[in-house]
Amino acid sequence: MSVPATATPTYPPGQHPDLPPPPGTAGVIGWLRANLFSSVFNTALTLVSVWLIYEFVTAAIDWFVLDAVWEAGSRVDCRKQGDGACWAVIAIRLDQFVYGFYPADQRWRPVLTFVLLFPALAPVLFDRTPYRSQLLWFSLAYPALGAWLIYGGLGLPVVDTDAYGGFLLTMILGVTGIVASLPLGILLALGRQSRLLAIRVLCVTFIEVVRGVPLITLLFIASTMLNYFLPPGTSFDLLIRVLIMVTLFAAAYLAEAVRGGLQALSRGQYEAADSLGLSYWKKTWLITLPQALKIAIPGMVNVFIGLYKDSTLVVIIGLLDPLGVARAVLADAKWNGLSNETYLFIALFFFLSCFAMSRYSLWLEGRLSVDDR
Amino acid sequence: MATIEDTERIRSAADTSRVMVEVRAMHKWFGTFHVLKNIDLRVTAGERIVICGPSGSGKSTLIRCINRLEVHQQGTIEVDGIELTRDVKNIEQIRSEVGMVFQHFNLFPHLTVLENCTLGPMWVRKLPKGEAEEIAQRYLERVQIPEQADKYPGQLSGGQQQRVAIARSLCMQPKIMLFDEPTSALDPEMIKEVLDTMLELAETGMTMLVVTHEMGFARRAADRVIFMDEGEIIEKNAPEPFFNNPQNDRTKLFLSQILSH
């Protein structure tokens, strides 16, 4: 859409003023014209798309909300009340979805642990948190505090790990896995670039072996084979074994993401740090790692989201994660056949958690990119 | 910029007969490629040496060997009486006494100008933050950009970045400064500000080894000019005779090529 050249008057050299763009080429109207209605065909496509979106959205609202049934005693009961979603199945089994078989009178403990997660995470995630330096001490103490609250002992009744289930189990696996795999992954990435052959070989072997094996295999090893390797008589909690495997698995992938960041740095950064006389660890901590981690954020968050979602695989070795609860619920004769509702609910939970992580990483990238504009 | 006391301090500390760099029969290979051949070089305190030569002649590699960014395979290098060996502590010690300015500045982009300058003093010299910042401010004033202290390197022009890089090295209060083509990556209008900074530094009596194609700088500041070609030192002389009466044919050819426009 060009405007005839005669429309602009001429000016003597050096006197040309800044003119506004021709009408209809900038702003909302300009965007609409350029992107949606630029030709007859495009206009037709736009109209058809709008109609399709309208049909889909209204149908979805009907099924999800307007025709949905929120309270009922069974699936048959649901169908009598309406032909939308039967959310009653979720409402009745909500406690199991959230806590698994965690005893009802002790549920304040996971709730408190969850609530305390926020003040523990805030100073780590946001550098402008008020009282950050004091709160960081709390963050440091949080893993032990959380473990004590959920497991018990020292005055609290012990709740065995096989009672954990549902979203509680997902959170335990996800948060522990992420927190523990980050330092391990960084060390592996550094080790892979080490000048010491033994360390390098060790790290490369570990990364390649763990990355080359499906997580399920590792989980089976955790649930069955690990007992053969350990000295007889030692019994190792299954949840701990699974946590270790999930952490190692994520660490191997993280190491590669971090290595990508380290290799993206110019050699000049290493040389400048060297020429100041900084030792290896100071150079790494002050110069290379901060820059490498920033570059690696998208890749690292990718790994974290993957770890979080892969935690559902523990259902295969008999842990009662949300999918395990879903299986149990769907096996109930009163409710079977409601897999849409059950799985959509679980999907929503995972989507919200993962979306939050993804938004945070975008925000962090923006926050850090202020540095080198 | 260089105050009289500064000049006095450095001059008196640097007894001009003291040998700061001593390279003896040094060879270096990149794989099988022989980059440096039988290099002998002695630099005394306060001396300003300009090293020039065609690209690929090994001049950058030579000064990078002096703070062991490159490792030599034969011969010896002594810096202020300490021989460069594989000993890591030894290398770190020498590097903290030898400042290096790179062609591409290599400032730390995630740190402010001030933090770039205080990093070495705080983490290598173990100075308290306040003292390190005082030193940093002083050298930023010397290179005439104190007002940029809180900006990030990416917000500065190339010339400003290079001056910050010089200040960052000076903050370590080094005994020797190495410059590896410090103006080669700059736009023409910014070369002068960096050369001016280097000239003023030369006036303070700093021991300097400068790899550069800026022959004007060599004429004005150098005590000796060294010409290298294909890994060898072909000719070394004071600037006057070097430029006016070069001895070797290769030197003559090189000078005619860079001075003939």
Image (cartoon, coloured by chain):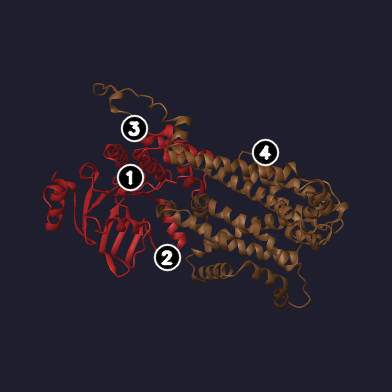
Residue at image mark 2: B86
Identify the hue of chain B.
red
Percent of width and height locating residue B146: 42, 33
User: How would you rate the neighbour count of disc 4 (Cα within 10 Å): few for under 14, some for 14-19, many for 20 or more?
Assistant: few
Give above or below for B126 relative to A195.
Answer: above
Q: The brown chain is which one?
A: A
The reply to whether dot 3 and dot 4 touch (C-beta < 8 Å) is no
* Dot label at residue A2: 3
Disc 3 vs disc 4: which is toward the camera? Answer: 3
A323 or A62, nearer to the observer: A62
Pair 2/1: label in front: 2
Amino acid marked by disc 2: Arg
* Mark 4 or mark 2, whichever is nearer to me: 4
- Chain bearing mark 4: A
Going from N to C along the chain, the mark reached first, 3 or 4, is 3
Q: Relative to the observer, which residue lies in front, A280 or B236?
A: A280
> Of the numbered discs in the image, which one, if any, rests on residue B206?
1
Q: Which of marks 3 and 1 is in front?
A: 3
Query: Against B24, is B183 above or below?
Result: above
Cβ atoms under marks 3 and 2 closer than 8 Å: no
Read off the residue under disc 4: A131
Q: Which of marks 4 and 1 is in front?
A: 4
Report the chain holding disc 2: B
- The answer for how far apart the CA atoms under marks 3 and 2 are is 68 Å
Q: How crowded is mark 2: few (under 14 residues within 10 Å), some or many (20 or more)?
A: few
Determine the CA span between mark 2 and mark 1: 27 Å
Mark pair 4, 2: CA separation = 46 Å
Same chain letter for marks 3 and 1: no
Query: Can residue B248 be seen in this snapshot?
Result: no
Judged left or right of residue A265, residue A55 is right
Q: How crowded is mark 1: few (under 14 residues within 10 Å), some or many (20 or more)?
A: many
